[in-house]
Image: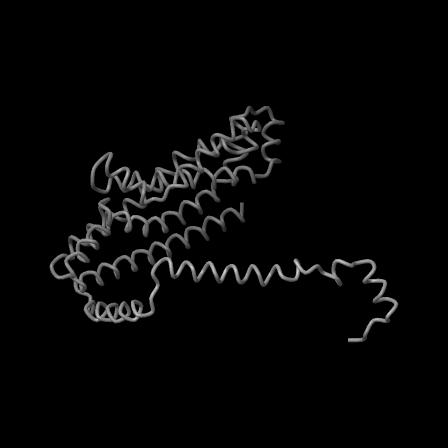
Amino acid sequence: MSKLPAAQTTELRARYPQVFDRPVSARLATPVMLLAAIAIFVFGLVHLGFSPARMLGGMHQLGWISMMMLPPDPGSSLPLYLKALGETLSIALLGTTLAAVLSLPVSLLAAKNIVPSNIFRFPVRRFFDAIRGVDTLIWALVWINVVGLGPFAGVLAIATSDFGAFGKLFSEAIEGADRKQVEGIRASGGNALHEIRFGLLPQVLPVIAGQVLYFIESNTRSATIIGIVGAGGIGLQLAEQIRVLEWQKVSFLILMILVAVAAIDWISSKLRFAIIGRRAVA
C-alpha cells in the first residue's frame, strides 16, 4: 500500500479531526466497558456461590447418576408412560391451538393497518405484553390453584402464555401484508370485513400456520416442564421417578421425550415447507 503525500494527510486531519485525534474518553470507552463486564461476571460468580470444588464434586455425582441410568428400562410401566406421553402431546397441541384461535381476532385490533388510532391499539398491545411477560411455568402454577392438578391446567397454562406471543406475532404479520389486495377489494365495492377476509387473511394465514407449527414443537418441551409441577403428562412421571431415584426409568422417559420432540420437529418442518411452497406457487 502506497503512503499518502504529507499534504493530503494534513488536509484529511483538518477535515476529519475526530478520526485522527480521538479524545481520551473515546479511546478508553471499549477497555472500560470490557473491564466492567468482566467485573460484573466475576461478581455474579462470587455472589451465586460458584466454587471449583463444588463443580468437581458435582461432576463426580453426575457421572455416578449417568452410570445408574444405563441401561434405560421402563420396567412394567411402559403403558403408563405411553399414556403420559400422549397427555403431554395433547397438552401442547390443544393449548397451542386454543391460543391461536383466541388470539387471531384480538390481534386484528393490535394491527396498525386495521386500527389506525393509537388510543385503541396501545392498550391491546400492552395487554399482549403483560400476558407474554409471565412464563408458562408461572401460569401453570396459577391454573393449578384455580382448576386443580391435571392436564387441563397444563392446557390453560400454555394457551394463556401463547395468547400473548401469538397476539404480537399475528399483529406484526398483518401489518406487513401487502395493501394492494386490500385496495383491490375496496375498489370493487367491498366493506371493511371483506378487506380483512379476502385481502389480508389469505396473505397472513400461511405465515400464521408456520408460527403455530413451530410453537407446537416448542410447547411439547414446555408441557414436559409444567408437568413436573403437577400439570400432568410425562413431566409428572419424570418428577416422580427422580424423586424415588429410579434412574433407569428416568433415562427411558428422557429418551421418550427426545424421540417425541424429534418426530414433531420433523413433521412440523415438512408441513412448514409444504405451506411455504404452496404460498410461493400461489
Residue 60 versus residue 29: which sits nearer the camera? Answer: 29
x%, y% of residue 144?
Answer: 24, 39
Where residue 248 sits, quadrant-wise, is bottom left
Closer to the camera, 11 or 159?
11
* Above or below 209: residue 200: above
Q: Is residue 204 above or below residue 45?
A: above
Coloring scheme of the render?
one colour
Please give the name of the residue rendered at 27% of the width and 67% of the height, measured from the top-left corner: 58
Residue at the farthest right position: 7
Q: Is residue 187 left or right of residue 142?
A: right
Which quadrant of the figure contains the N terminus? bottom right
Instruction: Name the image quarter holding residue 9.
Output: bottom right
Q: Which residue lies furthest to the left in this view?
A: 76
Q: Find residue 215 and report its horizontal and vertical position in percent.
A: 39, 47
Q: Nearer the viewer, residue 14 or 77?
A: 14
**Residue nearer the viewer, 218 or 147:** 147
Q: Is residue 249 above or below residue 127?
A: below
Residue 18: percent from left, percent from top:
75, 58
Place residue 252 in its image quadrant.
bottom left
Number of numbered tags placed on the structure image:
0
Q: In which quarter of the image is the C terminus?
A: top right
At horizontal 55% and vertical 37% (from top left) the residue drawn is 175
The residue that appears at 30% across and 71% down in the rendered structure is: 56
The structure residue drawn at horizontal position 74% and vertical position 61%, both measured from the top left corner, is: 19
Q: Is residue 68 above or below residue 36?
A: below
Which residue is the extreme one toward the bottom?
A: 1
In the image, residue 186 lies at what x, y percent? 60, 27
